[in-house]
Image (spheres, helix red, strand yellow):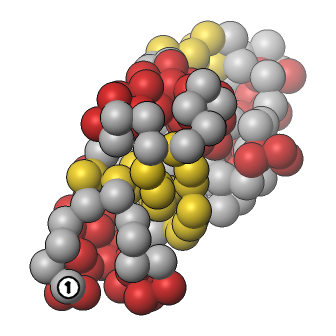
Amino acid sequence: ADIEWFIEQKVDVLVVSPNESEACTPVIEKAYQQGIHVILVDRKIATESYTAYVGANNYQIGKEAGHYAIGILKGKGNIAEVRGTKGSTSDAERHKGSTSDAERHKGFVDALKNAPEVRIVAETWGNFLKADAKVQMQQLFQQHPNIDLVFAMNDPMAAGTHEAAMQFNGKIPFII
């Protein structure tokens, strides 16, 4: 509704940090198609209809995390991945998730291609929330007790993973 109001006011530039990329995409695209310059901050949307993006290179973040994981595991080990949210975004048709989540996941997976004995053996969705990640990881640790490393897409989910591991058996995998 706020963005619709700005469109009606015929603003020249719209700066948006989409909290939920899927929900914001249609109205941001509408603004862009009406000639309003749209600058996205921190998160992208499910279209290329914007003027500029200011934010992290999430693919590279994931790739660096993958290389780091290979080093920590000395080239051999089992990984669990705690991803953010499922949804439809520009990269999500292939990777299912928010744009930052999907790009980080792709970079991480691409880095692991160079280490065939490092495997992602489990994946769960923590909705970028500590409590959700904790619940999901409690279940995952029961199904996969030999997790050596967990790649969580944000700090709250990493904290939830740590709490779940402490409650499961006290064995804390390395958490990125």
Q: Amino acid at mark 1?
A: Asn
- Residue 112 image-quadrant placement: top right
Query: Residue 161: x and y, percent?
Result: 29, 68
* Vertical relation: 34 (above or below) 20: above
Circle 1 residue = 169
Q: Residue at x 55, y 43 (%)?
A: 117
* Quadrant location of the C terminus in the rendered image: top left
Query: Residue 150: x and y, percent?
Result: 37, 56
* Vertical relation: 175 (above or below) 118: below
Q: Which residue occupies the foreground of this view, 80 or 100?
A: 80
119 displayed left or right of 95: left
10 Å crowding of disc 1: few (<14), some (14-19), many (20+):
few
25 displayed left or right of 11: right
Query: Residue 120: x and y, percent?
Result: 56, 54
* Vertical relation: 35 (above or below) 25: above
Q: Which residue occupies the foreground of this view, 84 or 142?
A: 142
Query: Residue 99: x and y, percent?
Result: 63, 40
Helix, strand or loop for disc 1? loop
* Vertical relation: 48 (above or below) 132: above
Q: Residue at x 44, y 44 (%)?
A: 76
